[in-house]
Image: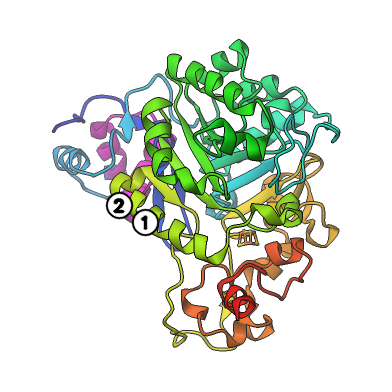
Amino acid sequence: MKIYNIHTNLTLSREYVLRKNEQNCSLFHIPSSVRYKITNELYVLLDFFKYNLISINEFTEVLKKQNILIDAGTLCDKLNIIDVPSVLVNDIKPYRVNKPADDFRETVFPERIDWLITEKCNLICKHCLQGSSCTKVNKDFNIQRLNELFYEMEKMDIETLKITGGEPLLAKNAKEIFKLLSNRLFDKTILTNLMLLDDEWLEIFKNKTFHLSTSIDGCSKLSHDYIRGRGSFEILIEKLKKLKQNDIPFASTVTLHPLNVDELNKIPEFVFNNLGSKKILFNYLRPIGRARKNDKLHLSQEKLKKVKCTLREIKEEYKEKVIIDDEADLSDSADKHSYTPKTKLKCAAGRTLMSLDENLNVFPCNYGIGNKLFLIDSAQTHSLSNIWLSEKWSLFRDGVPLYKIKDCKTCDFISKCTLKQCRLKPFADGVGFYSHVDYCYRANLINAL
Ligand code: SF4
Ligand code: SF4
């Protein structure tokens, strides 16, 4: 199908984030959250259109002045067959007007920034990682500073700003902040319990520049309210109907616990067909935060096995509409050929991810928040791009050699384990930076003996 011709003025579509990463080049489609890997050649071409509103014909004339001879018709034919939907569009202005300095453009900034906007919450869920509640105090924001940071995030070409809490809709000046964010050219994903959704929030979310993700911890009052408190299921269903009536898409997160695993088979149909959710993320409940103090919330090994089987069947049926946390599960076969004591374990923290707390302090990821040892700097007073260049990230960026990590270094499951690289969950959990998470596969096996 022909989309482009050589005469129409084109620029990069504002639905995309174009990035040059360490290993590859990519285009992130904001509405669908799909990331396309692209060639360096295509990156260079799209990068030109990012800062210009120009026809393919004029573009080839620009190239001609640099002694690069490309026929406009041939280039147009090539663009018509690339496998990325409507990446160039006719607009009234270029995607971006001001081109940052070369050293800024050459820096690979994080793909995602997580922002724990408030620790305050209107619910007191039994499993809350942050231990949030209504007794926590909301922090004041300097709106002008926030606006500068959002602008900078856009300039850094981040793909996603993920806003968590507490309850994000309860943060001080939340509506004003979300309105400021609405036209920023990156994905804004909000993890919300939706209880505070009102007409003004519906107006904010109607322009569909936010991805809403809400927790549904069962398809009955009994199971959902068990985790989130009496009456919360009914309110949630009423709010989700409002989203549906207003054609506002949302995704659901289901955390597995003893009362919802018996209705696991019914959850997808309920969430997709009755409520209109676009996706479900099934989460295993981890003994971190308030869930650590709540033994009754955790599934027995036997139940966990059955749950994993059922989840595989659900995944088979609903394919990409269903995401299962820790999908790359361990198999029982040992295979550690690719690991030596010197192998360095690295994770997203400080490499593709940075995290902000409610005071705009920067940490490697949310699990480091609140601990001075992992505080990188303050975004109240310093730019995010300068903070990203700090030496303080080296502990995470360089990786930790396997020989330093207790138990993992001798573990038979090392090559198949998806938990081993995490340094901050064990730390947050009180077992130490050079330890493994205490719910890992090997630890469970040993405990079961
Ligand atoms: S986290 Fe646990 S299962 Fe994974 S490699 Fe370390 S000890 Fe083994
Ligand atoms: S693996 Fe652990 S330390 Fe790394 S980003 Fe994830 S939670 Fe944070």
User: Which residue is at 70% across, 52% downward?
Assistant: 291
Residue 55 x, y percent position in the rendering: 28, 29
- How would you classify the magenta stretch by its main secondary structure? helix
Residue 312 disc label: 1
Residue 403 disc label: none
Looking at the rendering, which quadrant does residue 226 occupy?
Answer: top right
User: Label 2 neighbourhood size at 10 Å, few (<14), some (14-19), many (20+)?
Assistant: few
Residue type at the position of mark 2: Glu
User: Which residue is at 86% across, 33% downward?
Assistant: 137
Assign a secondary structure to mark 1.
Answer: helix
User: Which residue is at 75% across, 33% downward?
Assistant: 121
Above or below, 86 against 115 in this view is: above
> Ligand 1 appears in which quadrant?
bottom right
Q: Give the quadrant of the N terminus.
A: top left
47 drawn magenta: yes
Residue 396 seen anywhere in this rendered image of the structure: yes
Which residue corresponds to mark 2? 316
Residue 191 seen anywhere in this rendered image of the structure: no
User: Which residue is at 44% across, 19% downward?
Assistant: 244
Cα separation between marks 1 and 2: 6 Å
Residue 141 x, y percent position in the rendering: 80, 29
Assign a secondary structure to mark 2.
Answer: helix
Looking at the rendering, which quadrant does residue 166 occupy?
Answer: top right
Above or below, 113 against 230 in this view is: below
Q: Give the quadrant of the C terminus.
A: bottom right
As rendered, which of 255 and 402 lies closer to the eye? Answer: 255
Q: How is the image coloured?
A: rainbow
Give, as a single range, the part of the protein colored magenta: 35-63
As rendered, which of 50 and 436 lies closer to the eye? Answer: 436
Would you say the residues marked 1 and 2 are in contact, meaning their CB atoms lie under 8 Å apart?
yes
Give the left or right position of residue 92, taking residue 22 as reference. left
